[in-house]
Image (spheres, helix red, strand yellow):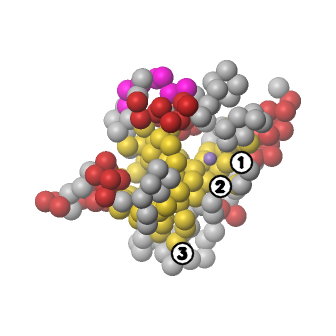
Amino acid sequence: MNDKLNAYRDKRDFDKTREPAGDEGASRGGRRFVIQKHDASLLHYDFRLEIDGVLVSWAVPRGLSTDPSVRRLAIRTEDHPLDYIDFEGVIPEGEYGAGAVLVWDTGSYRNLRADKGPHSVGMEDALEDGLIKVWLEGEKLRGGYALKRTDDGEQSRWLAIKMKDDAADARRNPVSTEPESVLTGRSLDDIADESAND
Ligand code: MN
């Protein structure tokens, strides 16, 4: 059991929700990310990066942009287990985070702060520093993204900004033009309806 997941487990009753309990354990040493669209009391996008055996997580109310002139608020939330990475379904009413969840984008990422020779910074230190720079290789999102912490505390506030590179595109708006799951092609309504029927 990973102690980093205590906050995650404390919020949930695994007899009631189908979310993973996170008792799988060891990391496969990968560097994966996921963005889950979550129709909770307020619709938001959960951005999660695999760091040291857990999915370090932020709730991004408006989702990530492909436009480098846009800054999106990202609120740090509790670390999630690695097997949450492909979770889609409905968190039942009355449970923490109740509502439908779909995998809006997923893929691998690279730590851009580790490419700096003698000034190389690992992901754990970048998280601690409050400055993360990653290259995403997703289906909808690609290229560099910076996450910058703007205050401290358990639910710290960060800004998520598209870096200027060949994947930056002020005309795209995948949050509105590509709303479906990259895993199943389903919408949030499809997922809610299927769950109501089983
Ligand atoms: Mn959420």
- Dots 2 and 1: beta carbons under 8 Å? yes
Quarter of the image for residue 30 reads top left
Indicate the secondary structure of the residue bearing disc 1. Answer: loop
Identify the mark at residue 40; answer none if there is no mark. Answer: 1
Label 2: which residue? 44
Q: Is the Cβ of the residue at disc 3 closer than 8 Å to that at disc 1?
A: no
Q: Is mark 1 within 8 Å of ligand 1?
A: yes
Picture residue at 53% right of the left edge, 35% below the top: 8
Residue 44 x, y percent position in the rendering: 65, 55
Please name the amino acid that badge 1 sits on. Ala
The 10 Å Cα crowd at callout 1, few under 14, some 14 to 19, many 20 or more, is some
Viewer-nearest residue: 173 or 161: 161
Q: Element at badge 2?
A: strand
Residue 24 within the segment the image draws in magenta: yes
**Number of the front mark, 3 or 1:** 1
Answer yes or no: is residue 77 visible: yes
Horizontally, is 42 left or right of 183 in the view? right
Q: Is residue 56 above or below residue 145?
A: above
Q: How much space separates mark 3 and mark 1, taking CA atoms? A: 24 Å
Q: Is the residue at mark 2 in contact range of ligand 1, meaning its CB lies under 8 Å from it?
A: yes
In the rendered image, which quarter contains the C terminus? top right
Q: Quadrant of residue 152?
A: bottom left
Q: Give the residue type at disc 2.
A: His
The residue lying toward the viewer, choosing from 121 and 172, is 121
Q: Identify the amino acid type marked 3.
A: Val
Q: Is residue 86 left or right of residue 185?
A: left
Q: Which residues are magenta?
A: 21-27
The disc, 3 or 1, on the residue closer to the chain's N-terminal end is: 1
